[in-house]
Image (cartoon, rainbow, N blue to C red):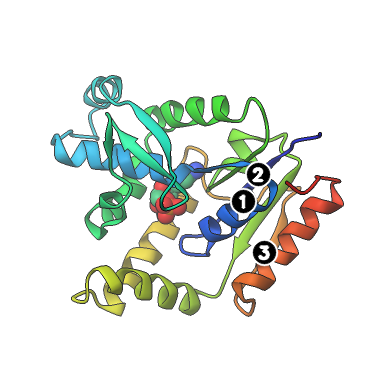
Amino acid sequence: MKKIIITIDGWSSCGKSTLAKQLAKALNYVYVDSGAMYRAITLYFLRNHVDWTDKKEVEKALKAISLEFNYNDKLQQSEIYLNGENVEYVIRDLVVAEKVSDVAAIKEVRDFAVAQQKKMGRHRGIVMDGRDIGTVVFPDAELKIFMTADNAVRVERRFKELYEKNPAITLDEVKTNLEMRDYIDSHRDVSPLRQADDARILDNTNLTEKEQFQKALKWAHQLKVPAA
Ligand code: DC
């Protein structure tokens, strides 16, 4: 059975993880949320007052960080663990979201995360989403998807998601954070967000979750990937 690597990159709040999870389930592949790794590192830096403008401090802190994904059978999803603690939910907080793009722009942080991501793909049969997965982590991936959607649609989607957890949040806060992250992610020196030359664009502004899933699954099947 030929197993492939599927990469999904794109702007924040484009629905990358929703699609990645659906594809991984349909193909019986492993799903890895690379953004969760940058978020968990950011959480560690914040909790431990790491000055991430200081290279030495960053290197020291990274040595104390162990990241792991464990599958939660009950919720049927993989969850990230930071030094043995399940942080899947705390890392979605706006406090982390506000700093994560700065932390993800640090070369040492990226080297640390990318090395682990590459290892996770060594047996193929993986769907990974992020910003540099098709360009840097798996440049040889068989299927590369670049997701995009109108800004207003993305803000609305993220707002709905965050509002459920925190009704005090405003649409403006979400919009500002999203625009800031998009800017930093696409303008940083190390591995900025960009579409791989051989990526297929998936604009889901006017697509339902089901429609986008069917489109991507068709692409996978065109590569002769057997169903699970
Ligand atoms: O996908 P996300 O919103 O959870 O990602 C959180 C942040 O991490 C985002 O601002 C960009 C960064 N990121 C990155 O630089 N490279 C990746 N492969 C994944 C995420």
Q: CA distance from mark 3 to mark 1?
A: 11 Å
Q: Which residue carries the number 2 mark?
A: 28
Q: Three-letter amino acid code at disc 1?
A: Lys
In percent of width and height, residue 42 lies at 28, 41
Q: State which quadrant residue 127 falls in.
A: top right
Look at the numbered disc 2 and give the secondary structure of its residue. loop
Look at the numbered disc 3 and give the secondary structure of its residue. helix
Q: Which mark is residue 110?
A: none
Q: Three-letter amino acid code at disc 2?
A: Asn
Q: Three-letter amino acid code at disc 3?
A: Phe
Mark 2 and ligand 1: say if the CB distance to the nearest ligand atom is below 8 Å.
no
Residue 155 in the image: above or below residue 196? below
Describe residue 222's horizontal placement relative to residue 121 as left or right: right
> Pointer 2 and pointer 1: residues touching (CB < 8 Å)?
yes
In percent of width and height, residue 186 lies at 49, 52
- For disc 2, the neighbor class at 10 Å (few under 14, some 14 to 19, many from 20) is some
Name the residue: 67% across, 44% down: 6
Mark earlier in primary sequence (3, 1)? 1
Q: CA distance from mark 2 to mark 1?
A: 5 Å
Mark earlier in primary sequence (2, 3)? 2
In percent of width and height, residue 208 lies at 62, 76
The N terminus: image quadrant: top right
Considering every residue shown, the one lying at the far front of the view is 74
Q: CA distance from mark 2 to mark 3?
A: 15 Å
Mark nearest the camera among 3 and 1 is 1
Q: Which residue carries the number 1 mark?
A: 25
Look at the numbered disc 1 and give the secondary structure of its residue. helix
Q: State which quadrant residue 205 falls in.
A: bottom right
Q: State which quadrant residue 167 falls in.
A: bottom left
